[in-house]
Every structure is written in structure tokens, then in C-alpha cells.
Amino acid sequence: MTDASNDIESLYVYGERLSEAKDKSQNVEDYKSIIEAARTSSIKARQLAAQLIPRFFKFFPGLSGSAVDAHLDLCEAEELGIRVQAIRGLPLFCKDTPEHISKIVDILAQLLIAEENVERDAVHKALLSLLRQDVKASLTALFKHIESVDEPVTDDNLRERTLIFIRDKVFPLKSELLKPQEQMERHITDLIKKSLQDVTGAEFKMFMDFLKSLSIFGEKAPTERVQELVEIIEGQADLDAQFSGSDGDHVDRLISCLYMALPFFIRGASSSKFLNYLNKHILPVFDKLPEERKVDLLKNLAESSPYAAPQDSRQILPSVVQLLKKYMPRRKTGEEMNFTYVECMLYTFHHLANKAPNATNSLCGYKIVTGQPSDRLGEDFTELYKDFTERLSCVEDLTKATMKKLTQGMGQQNKSTGAGVSDEEKARIQNATTGLRTCNNILAMTQPLHSKSPSFIGDKRINLSWNEAVKTVAPTKTAGGKRPADAVKGSSNQSNKRGRGVNNQLVDRAFEGLSYGGRGGGSRGGGQGRGWGRHSQGQGRGRGYYR
């Protein structure tokens, strides 16, 4: 009989004696011999030791240190079969000694970086076994590998593998694992909040999507719970930080976080902190922002405006009116008007003015009477009213001319193409259709504003153009998720391209001189196509946030 055979035979004897012994503590030498077998050269003997060490672990607390150390050596063995067997045995250390759960989960988390699928699958099953045994202790140990203020993570690969495990294995089982429900949902929420000091855009969205799915933040949750989610987003947006006009990364993060917060404003959470930050830091330097982000900002501001508090509305209205006048020409100059900008700002203006109507007296020359000193009815704002209404009239003239060109271009396109329409042509027709919706919205919002005492639109009668369902083929996107310049600006350069037919040229002529601004709403705020790197410390995200 070989030495390996002798080792295996001896292990079976030790195991049988321990199984049959009523007082197993009397067989301490047998357990010591099993521990020693973990260091033999025999593969089969070490595999058998990997089964026996955790099986009798609870009976020999005095040998717990050496038993765990020997088992960990087996988890790091060169032979895959030994490693897998040892990993499968790790949860058994906690079966009757739950005080070891945190330590074993910590060990298993470090093994998530295993490259072999069968080995990684064993780690996943072992972790899930421990999560089912004690979800609170297991989650706490797992999240230490993601990163918190107290315990910085140095191994990015391990951190990523831990996140993947939590996303793919833990989150889908929340209804099974998070019991008692409210207590454990609160616990995992607190763990997530501590882990958001340094996350990528995709990671933050993953965490927020999960939090939204918890019952404590569900549709029946009280407003203070919904506000808690907004406060998490506010923290990620760095709303307490000073803003540098050249910090494009901060702008990206701010816009994306505001977009993420919109559903919670609808549910009653306060938008005050976001709006005040925009008013104080962003709108005054609007012209310095990256061009492709301006429209995203204005769209998010427009969609937030119906949920602004009266005091916030009063504070932000001056900045909005100033910006609105900048993009509403007083007279026709031959320059392009950015119709999307104007739609966004008119919508924002109406909803804010609806909350603080008499604030427009000193901004636009209106005469709205509320009986408050802020009416300022004794002052002469005639010139402001004249200026504002002249701009409204100019906008209306430009808008009507644009609608005529778009309608003619689309009519010619429909007559010429018949059934054979390319994806590019469909995209251009869709873009023109959106342009018509934009124009219709602008006219619906300018017309009431000519009155000396207008009624501002504060309901949902205006459906913002980009919120219409898009059923046709979307335009081809370039790197970074941006739409082609011709789809965005309606550039007349398209007619110079070789190989284009009459049909395309007709639509091009309809687009000449038009400007819709910015990118499509599909990528707004979502961060798709943009990196959002983790930062090393402080407020800045070193490798870009939503780029």
C-alpha cells in the first residue's frame, strides 16, 4: 500500500472514530491528525481533509485557529479540485458557530477573484449559503470590500468582483434574503449609503435602481423616505461644493443626478437644493458650459420646474428670465434661434411664474395684483414689458416661418419617397416631426404672455416635445452617444454631400437655418456612452463622471 493510500485510510479511520464518539472532545488527537493531513502531498488525502476539517470544527474550539489556517491553505492549493472542495466546506465552519460568519464571508469575498468558473461558482454558492444563515452579518462583511470612509479598498479587481456578485446574486434575491423585511432593507440601505463615497456612474445608478425597488422606498412610502433618496443623489451631485465654470465633469454629474432625482420630485420630495445650486452656480455661467450639455441642463430644469416651491420659484425666476431674453431675439437678425432652448425656458418660466406670479412684474413689466408689497405696482416697468413682448413676437414670427418650412419639406419628402424610405430619411422625418412639436409648444406658451396680466401655465397641458414616444428608427449615434450634427442643428451642409438624391435635398432645404440644439432625450442624464470614473479622494472624480 502506498503512502497516499495509507493517508486516505487513516483519514477514514479518524473520521469514523469522531463520528461514533459520544464525547468527541476526547478524540482531539484524531482531529489534529486530520488538520495535519491538509499538508500532505496526496491530492485525495487533502480533498478528504477539506471535508473533515469543517465537519468536526465545532467540537474543538481550542484548535479553531489551526483548523481554519489549514483549510485556507487548501483553498489556495494549486489543484483546482482541492480548492473547490475546500471552498464548499467554508460555510460549515459557521453552521453551529455563527460567530465566525463575518470572517468566513471575508475570506470568501477575497476568493471572488478566482478565474476558473467552477471555482467561482463554488464561492458564489458558499456566500449565498451564509447570506441565508445570517444576512446582516454577511452583508456587512461583503460591503467592506466595496469601500467606505472607514475602510478604503486597495484591490480594485476584488472590489469589482464583489460588486458584480452583489448585483447579480444578492439583489435579485432581495425578497428571499432581506428578512425581516423592513429591518434588513434599512440595513442594506445604510451599507449602500456608506459605500457611495467613491463610485462610478454605472455603480451609482445600479445602487439607486436597487434602492428604488425596496419596499421602504416604494410607491406607498412616506415623503420623508422619498426625500432620503433625493438626499443620496444630492450628495453624489456635490451640491455643497463650489463650482468652477471649467469643471465639465461636475456639470455632467450634476445634470445626470438631477435627471435621476426627477421621479422623486414627482413623488413629493423637495427640489430646493438642486434648484438653488443651479441658480447660484450654473445658470450665471451657462454660456461657459460645454455646448452638448446645455440642452441637457435646460431639459432637466424644465422638467423640474413644476415641482419647485414658491420661494424657490421666486429666487430662480430672475436668472431664467435673463437667460430667456438672451435666446429670444428682439428682432430678426438672420441668426439662428435655438428652438429647443426657447421651448425649455418658456416651459420653466411658466411653471415658476405660476408659483410666484407677481415676481414677473419687475422682470417682464406685467401688472399682476396679489395685494403683496412685492407686486411693486407703483413702479414703471413699461420698457421691460415692451422689450419682453417684442421678443415674444419675434419668436412667434420665427417659429411660424420654421413650421412652414418644415411642413413643406416633409410634404415634398412624402410625395417623393413613397414606400422606399431609408433609415436615415426616417430619422430626418422624425427630427422634423419633433421640430414641429417644439414649434407648436413655443406658440402655445408665448401667446398668453402678451397680456398685461397673463395666466401662467402651471398644469400638464404642454407635453414637452422630447417626451413624445419615438416609434421610428433613431438616428445613427457617434462616439459618446452624440447624435450627428445634421440631426441636431439641421445644418445645410448636408446638401453638399455627394450621392444624395433630390428627396434628401428637399428636407435639407426645410432644415436650413434651423437650430434645435443639443442631443436627443434618450441619453440625457443616463450617462450611457460616458465614463464615470472613481476618484481617489476629495470631491473630484478623477477619470470623469458621465463622459
Image (spheres, grey):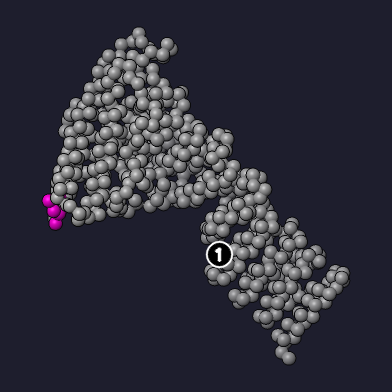
Mark 1 — residue? 113
Residue at 30% in and 14% down:
381
Looking at the rendered structure, the kind of residue marked 1 is Ile
Expressed as whole percent of the image width and height from the top left, the position of residue 106 reads 64, 59
Q: Is 482 positioned to the left or the right of 281 in the image?
A: left
User: Compared to 485, does 34 lie above or below?
Assistant: below
Q: Is 416 positioned to the left or the right of 144 in the image?
A: left
Expressed as whole percent of the image width and height from the top left, the position of residue 73 reads 67, 71
Return the residue nearer the eye: 89 or 253.
89
Quadrant containing the N terminus in the rendered view: bottom right
Q: Is 305 positioned to the left or the right of 51 in the image?
A: left
Residue numbers of the magenta segment: 499-503
Using the rendered image of the protein, determine whether residue 530 is visible from the camera's viewpoint.
Answer: yes
Residue at 51% in and 44% down:
538
User: Compared to 115, does 175 lie above or below?
Assistant: above
Q: Tell me if residue 242 is in the magenta stretch.
A: no
Residue at 22% in and 51% down:
425
Expressed as whole percent of the image width and height from the top left, the position of residue 341 reads 30, 35
| Main SS, magenta residues | loop
Tell me the crowding category of disc 1: few under 14, some 14 to 19, or many 20 or more residues within 10 angstroms, Cα based: some
